[in-house]
Amino acid sequence: MKEDGTTIVIGNLYSGIAARFSEDAKAFKTDLNIMVATHYAFIIDKGFEVKINGDLVKPRPTRLIFTKEPKGKKAPSIQPFIFKTKTKEGVEVFLTVGFTRPIPSQDEIANEQEDKRYSSLDAGWTILCNDRAVLYCDRNELTGWGEAGVPRYHTQFIAISGVVEFRSDDASKLPTTTIKRGIDASSPLYLQIKNKMREGMRLFTDYTYKWKGRAEESKKHIELGTPLSLEEIKTEAMKLPFSATKRSVPQGNQFKPSLPLPKKLESRKRRISFTKNVGEVKTVADYLFKDENTDPSDVGEKCFDLILKEACK
Amino acid sequence: MKHPPYPLRPNKAVDRFMLIEAIRKLELIGDLSEYTYYGFGGPYLEEFRLLYEFCPEIGMVSIEEDGDTLKRQKFHLPCGTLRLERAQFKSFLAQYDSKDEKSIFWLDYTRLDFGAFEDFQVLLEKVAANSVIKVTLRADPGDYIDKADDFRAQFGALMQDPSADPPRDSEQFADFVQDMLQVAAQQVLPAAVEMTFQPLTSFCYADGVSMFTLTGIVCQRAEQKAIRSHFKSWPFASLNWGRPKRIDVPFLSTKERLHLQKHLPCERNTGQRLLKVLGYAIDANNRKSAVKLKQYADFHRYFPYFVKAIP
């Protein structure tokens, strides 16, 4: 070898495995790239480098929206929920959950089946154990979805993402399976932390219910924030007012954000909502705006305004 | 619903004929009457008209979602054996059961959506052996200039390098889209399973908007070599996921075409020889004219004549 390092050569592959590298090479490279970019995102972000056939893998870490300087001390703003602790066994836990982007509108949720404009790929919980992702963007009961007041995962929650980092000098204390590639769902530590995961998730699922039908208004709050990586959130967290959680097990410190609430519609205002045939909406959009792809809510509002003008004559 | 003048797009017309030619070669594999063709015919049902003309024994089904377009289709029915089905394609696909009967599907999309790749994958798993799938997608790099992030967010799961920028050159972009289709095919029909997707033709063209189209056959791996041998000598075949062939036929008057016709076919220095026959350039310069005339020579048998007809 020309440089210091380690070369691993694997020969005598089973025919099915050999085929993955030959006939299925393109799909294999795609899948491997995604796997590395997601599961090793956090360690790549810290400087670890992975190349596949010479191409550097760019990480896809979870980034949560964090409003750094909310107006006034107690002004509601989009920030993640954070819990941190160090157990008696010496395991450090850092948990954070929040939004990765604006919540989807009703039209976008309804059209997701057709347009696939959004991908659920980044939603859900990622669990790290000593920098290794043992679970990536999970959206099932394993991470608390569909349990204890948390709804089952749905496209409405596509913007919600969380990360739990477990760190310990003694790897046997970590809540992983024996092969270190999954989470041990029966681990007492994990079950305790899962309570906090659900507590954090409820804040954000509840937010999506409160802002249902008003995604555009909610977007203004979310756009005030900046997407931050896990390490950046840890840095910003040092400036946040944490409170001790004496009742929870394990005890720790948490920051519960004050998320913006929608203003109640003025009593003099009413919401109008209806569905129409897609072709008819496009026809009217083209007629009014010369663009059949105009947002349906804009089309509806324009129709109302035009008739109101007529009615007021 | 507004529709562009589909029958007047010369490059698309050539591509349509390429499909007919590929279908005719299926006779080397099996009986054409065992096939049913499914397509999005549009208001004029052009491909069904051609299919009925050249392969009347194939059953035909047109799938259309829009009510007004369906009425136009009923008006333009080329024959009594074409069945018009009003349905959204995804719903049709969810219900579709091949019952082991061979089919030909043309997924003729006007956009580039992740959903199109999903439809392709669903079909790969559903169709019977020796069925043909053709996918046409919009492949215009101009759609993604300064929108590389959007492209990666939508198509990252099909890109060998999910951090790459989509190419800006239209032919490279078509090749990129082909790669994505290849990944999609390998994901659902990996080497470990009995069936595979064998590409037959691959083209890119532009009638205003750049498009990419791929045709392939779903077959047993054990029969793949035999099927390849049936298409090997066909000059328009693309059997190895190579770079898409460009269809870019020049617009020539009927008089010019008839004048050139007597010099075809022409094996060597085709473009230059036809340029000499014409005696003038038909593009910006002689070099480009020769390229266009070579295109004409390659596809002249499939290039429609546009004439004024007495209705």
Image (cartoon, rainbow, N blue to C red):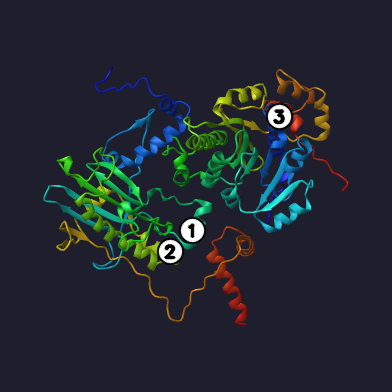
Amino acid at circle 2: Ala
Is the residue marked by circle 3 packed among few (<14), some (14-19), or many (20+) residues within 10 Å? few
Q: How many marks?
A: 3
Is there any visible trace of residue B8 in the rendered image? Answer: no
Q: Nearer the viewer, mark 2 or mark 1?
A: 1
Measure the alpha-carbon separation of dots 2 and 1.
10 Å
Amino acid at circle 1: Glu
Amino acid at circle 3: Glu
Quarter of the figure with residue A203: bottom left
**A289 with respect to B83 (left or right):** left
- Identify which residue is drawn at 83% across, 29% down: B258
Q: Quadrant of the N terminus of chain B?
A: bottom right
The residue labelled by disc 2 is A215
Measure the alpha-carbon separation of dots 1 and 3.
46 Å
Label 2 lies in what chain?
A
**A283 with respect to A130 (left or right):** right
Look at the picture and state if A77 lies above or below A143: below
**Tags 1 and 3 on a common chain:** no
- Identify which residue is drawn at 49% across, 35% down: B183
Q: Are marks 2 and 1 in contact (CB under 8 Å)?
A: yes
The residue labelled by disc 1 is A108
